[in-house]
Image (cartoon, grey):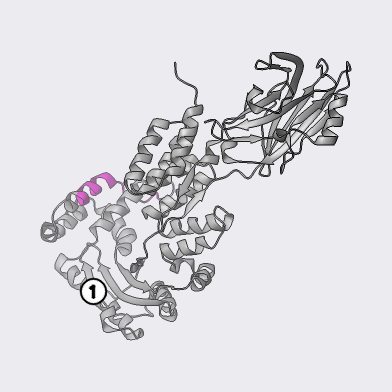
Amino acid sequence: MKRPLIISLLCTLLLPLYAQQAIHLTGEKSGQDTQAEVANVNVVKTAGRTVVTMDFIFDQMDVPSNRYRAFTPIIRSANNEQEQRLKTVIVSGRRQNIVFERDGIDALYAPTAGTEPVIIARQKGQPQQYAYTDAVDDQPWFSGASLFIESDLCGCGDKMKNDETFITHMLPPDPWDLVELINKEPDTYKPARELHGTAYITFVVDRWEMKPDYMDNRRELRKITDTLDIMVADKNITVNTIKIHGFASPESPYNHNHMLATNRAKSLTDWLRQNYQLPASAFAPAEATPENWMGLSEAIKELAATPAIIAPAALTHKEDIAAIVNDLLSKDSLTIARTADATEASIKRRYPQDYQYLLKNVYPGLRRSDYEITFNIRQFNTIEECLDIYRTKPHQLSKHELWRVAQTMQPFSDDYNRAMQTALNFYPDDEVVNLNLANVALAQHDILKAQTLLEHAGTSAEADNARAVIAIVQQRYAEAEQLLNAAQQKGLNVARNREALATLTQLAPQQP
């Protein structure tokens, strides 16, 4: 299900004064020139209303006693297919006023909802002005429309005989008012999750029995047990597997280290099995890396980046040792197993002081136990459950469950935007999550953030639509057309943005 999100301006939009100098109203059809003028035209959009003000100037206008002149402002769409008539100003002679009171005004100017005419008696030969104001409900097609004044200078009440004078173009539309953003609903798949960590369990030299109270083992074990305790106690979580991967440091023969690392990993696995009542299948076979040469390479690289003032006793032949280690790591696993002892002996022989530094300061950290816990979080089927979990444990929600939470909120409100951001925090690589947050950024007119998110949003129709919106507001109309075509070919209804593109293209200055 796709839910369109239409951007609209909520703020007041003030348009500038258009006509400071008077505009003369003439009657080409009637052949009359009655010297009526308008000045100080102003248009304001506020709170969903369009307000038109101007000054009608009748100083030089002559109206016979038994006649009238009528002036009607009209807002007409850019394509000339829609118009909004504002209230009419009727300037009448003395006798004509009596006729109006007796028979009413001509049908063209008869009162209708929102267009009650104003009737003014002309003060013959005297300066006379009328401060005109009218307000109508704002319409989407007002953007880019034009303001005219229809002049009935013959007093006929016959629209066919009336003249029109162009007053001004209204402001070009803000493209953000016209475009439509379309979210995409994430899939409902809730995959198993993984948690990774490292514990530095200390074993007695050349032994592999697990001793929880030996050295700092109790503290290191808590890295695993604190996590498992929380999972086991949470009714929403099912632990699938616990896998231990042991590492030994490079000193001693490779085969001996292989035996130590493997048995120590098994020992830790067995200890966890004894302390947690989980199915036997939850405890994966232990794995081991006999000698942690990769960890040694990373440690040397870190030392190379450490200023000498911080680590004055650090290696003096870092580059040489790093080259030896990296050369070994470039080999396949069988070659590493066969040549590891010779490599370690070479470092010890060629750089004895550096080797002693490694043995004391680096090798202990290479002896570690990595753990991986895979687990499932159950589906939350009702929106009430989703909202409750969102307030307390949002990390347990799937991307679709977070979507459902967001749909209970006002689009683009702070709460809605926060829910969409939460989804990205937990699912940063998901294309749909990136797309939906890009739409939030576009609703805030943050194009740079939206573009960054769209780099990870894939090529869905909705992503094409979002990119088209950016192209539209940046006046890259040819590119917008291509993107809308692509989105439509993928089955998305982009009629709203096609209409926006057509409107803006029509109003764009023509290139010479």
Secondary structure under tag 1 reads loop
- Residue at 14%, 68% (x, y): give it: 255
Above or below: residue 200 compared with residue 100? below
- From where the camera sits, is residue 317 visible? no
Please state which of residues 235 and 53 is positioned toward the viewer in this rendering: 53
Q: Is residue 153 left or right of residue 75?
A: right
Q: Is residue 113 left or right of residue 428?
A: right
- Residue at 22%, 46% (x, y): give it: 323
Above or below: residue 337 compared with residue 262? above
Where is mark 1, residue-wise?
Answer: 286
Q: Position of residue 224 (x, y in %)?
A: 38, 73
Above or below: residue 418 compared with residue 501? below
Residue 21, picture quadrant: top right
Q: Is residue 115 left or right of residue 143?
A: right
- From where the camera sits, is residue 493 visible? yes
Residue 276, picture quadrant: bottom left
Question: Which image quarter is the C terminus in?
Answer: top left
Please state which of residues 225 and 161 is positioned toward the viewer in this rendering: 161
Q: Position of residue 82 (x, y in %)?
A: 57, 35
Q: Position of residue 410 (x, y in %)?
A: 57, 57
Please state which of residues 400 and 337 is positioned toward the viewer in this rendering: 400
**Is 317 contained in the magenta span?**
yes
Q: Position of residue 61 (x, y in %)?
A: 80, 17
Question: Which image quarter is the N terminus in?
Answer: bottom left
**Where are the magenta residues, as a range?**
311-326
